[in-house]
Each structure stands twice: as structure tokens, then as C-alpha cells.
Image: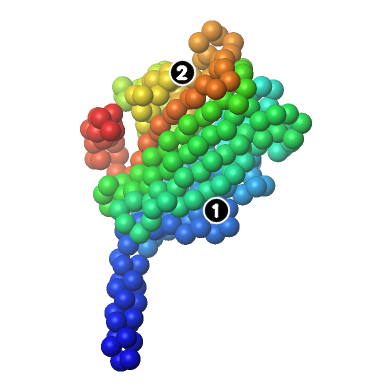
Amino acid sequence: MLNYYRINLVIALIGFHLLINAQITAVQQGPNIEVRIKNQYFTTYISSADEKYPFFYPVNGPSGTSVTSMRNGTYPHHSSLFFGCDKVNGGNYWQEELSRGQILAIQTQIKETGGDQVVIEQECLWHRPDARAPIKDFRTIIISAPTEDIYQIDFHISLEMLMDVTIEKTNHSFFSARMDPDLAVINGGNMINAEGDQTEKGTFGKASPWMDVTGKRGNMLEGLCIMQHPENRWYPAPWFTRDYGFFSPTPMYWPENGEFIKMMKGDVLNLKYRVLVHQGDLKTINLASLFEQYKSE
């Protein structure tokens, strides 16, 4: 009997040791998932049924402060780090009330936690009460920390067309970030693309593999970079940028025929993005080299 208790005590201690030493952990709290890196809070992936779409907020940098902002008074539809789209078969899956369109999580699961990465899988329906759903999407989100100064989110999304889908020209489309005001260009931050073009004036409408926004946090630099994977359709998509802190690789504002993009029932659109939340500027962390690594994955 004594050996039995000793064995169970050892098992419990091993489990506790693994828990406190886990590199990256995720905990599901209702529809939302909270992620920690080395026991430091990183982000929550929010998928509540009363939200317009799933999104990440906050997105904390290594300093412990969010590099993104949430629903600025002027632009209440900017929810930190998110994926959505306006003008989809007459629906709006980006802004306005839920009755105009909503990307609704059907199921969300943590597939991996407690090691070098967290893996989240999710299925979403593009829902509108007065119309048939035009799209179903499947998401795989992989969160890791390649170094102490870089936190990484890999966002893979596969969009299945449930009917013929027309997306009219819109700047409200696809993967996007709204930076914290402290880091925005208008407050002294730096927005720069892979070619070295800077600010809204230099980057707006230009195709580039990646874009980074970095600004001062006390006596340090902190920022966020979005990378497009070369396998993406429209790669490299042109960027919609704003000096107040919004940036998005968004082909829908520059559609192929100038008016709309059409996809047929049964078509599948696969898109991959990598987000790097980092301390230091693009030279310090060698963003160009990190993108070359991403290209080969």
C-alpha cells in the first residue's frame, strides 16, 4: 500500500514539474483560448458568439505589453489581429452589426500544448441570418517562441466556397493588424516593407512579402511583422497601410479585373501568414533572414 502511494506521489510530482516547466501552454476558457509563453501571458484567441469574428487580443510582446490595440474609437471594427472580409455576396464579415454577417466558430480545439508550441484547430462558418452561408473555413494556428525576443503565430486558413462567391473591391479584407498607438508611425514608430519602403506614403498599394511596424516602448523597441507565404494566391499581395497603425496584405482592394474577385462553389482558397512579435528592430532580429526561412517551410 505504501509503495502504491509513493508511485502516485512520484507521478503527481512529475506532472507538476512538466506543467511548471512547459514552454508554451494553452487553456480553453469557454469559447476563448489563453496562451502563455514560459508562464508569461501572451495572447487570447477570442471566438465568442457575440463577436464579429475570431481574433487575438491582446498580443503581448516580450515586454509584457500588447503591441496591438482593440477597437479604436474612430475605427471600432479594428480588433487587434484578425481575419475578415467585407462585400462577400452582399454580406459584411468585417464590420457593422452581426446581422450583416459574422464569422462564427463552430468548433475550436487545442490539439497541442505544454511543449515547444501550441496548436489550435478551428472550424468557422460565415453566417448571415437572412442568407445561406457562402464560406466555411478551417484554421490551424501554431504559436511558438523561436527566441526570447521573438514570439511567433503561424496562421493557416483554408476557405471552402459553399456557393459561387463574389467579393467586390474592398479595403476591408483578409489578415490584418491594428497596432497599439504607441508604436504607430504618427507617434514615432516605423512602418517598413521588405524592399525598405517606409510609412503609408511609401508602402500603400505596393506588393511586398512582408511588412513590419516597430516603435519605442520605454527604452526598448518592440513591434509586429506580418509575412505572406509564397504559396498564397496573389503573392505577394499589395498592402493597405495607414500611419495610424493599420496594415493588411489585401488583394481585394486591387482585384484582378478592377471590380471584383469571383470564386466558384467547391473552390478552396488556402492562405498562410506568419506573425512575428518581436523586441528590437528588423536589423536586430534579421527579419530578411527569418522570411527566407519561412519561404522554405
Dot 1: what SS?
Answer: strand
| Residue 109 horizontal/vertical position (percent) | 49, 51
**Residues at circles 2 and 1 in contact by the CB criterion of under 8 Å:** no
Q: Amino acid at mark 1?
A: Asn
Q: Residue furthest top?
A: 257
- The image's mark for residue 32 is 1
Rendered position, 63 above or below 186: below
Q: Amino acid at mark 2?
A: Gly
Rendered position, 102 above or below 268: below
Residue at image position (54%, 59%) is 29
Give how far apart the Cα atoms at labels 2 and 1 are.
34 Å
Q: Toward the viewer: 288 or 56?
A: 56
Residue at image position (38%, 56%) is 113
| Residue 230 horizontal/vertical position (percent) | 34, 24
Of badges 2 and 1, the one in the foreground is: 1
Query: Is there any visible trace of residue 295 in the rendered image?
Result: yes
Seen in the image, is 161 located left or right of residue 286? right
Q: Which of the image's four quarters has the N terminus?
A: bottom left
- The image's mark for residue 42 is none
- The image's mark for residue 205 is 2
Query: Is there any visible trace of residue 79 in the rendered image?
Result: no
Q: Earlier in the sequence, mark 2 or mark 1?
A: 1
Q: Residue furthest right?
A: 130
Q: Toward the viewer: 153 or 178?
A: 153
**Badge 2: how crowded within 10 Å, few (<14), some, or many (20+)?**
some
| Residue 236 horizontal/vertical position (percent) | 38, 20
| Residue 241 horizontal/vertical position (percent) | 48, 26
Residue at image position (45%, 23%) is 239
Q: Quadrant of residue 12?
A: bottom left
Q: Which of the image's four quarters has the C terminus?
A: top left
Q: Quadrant of residue 104?
A: top right
Dot 2: what SS?
Answer: loop
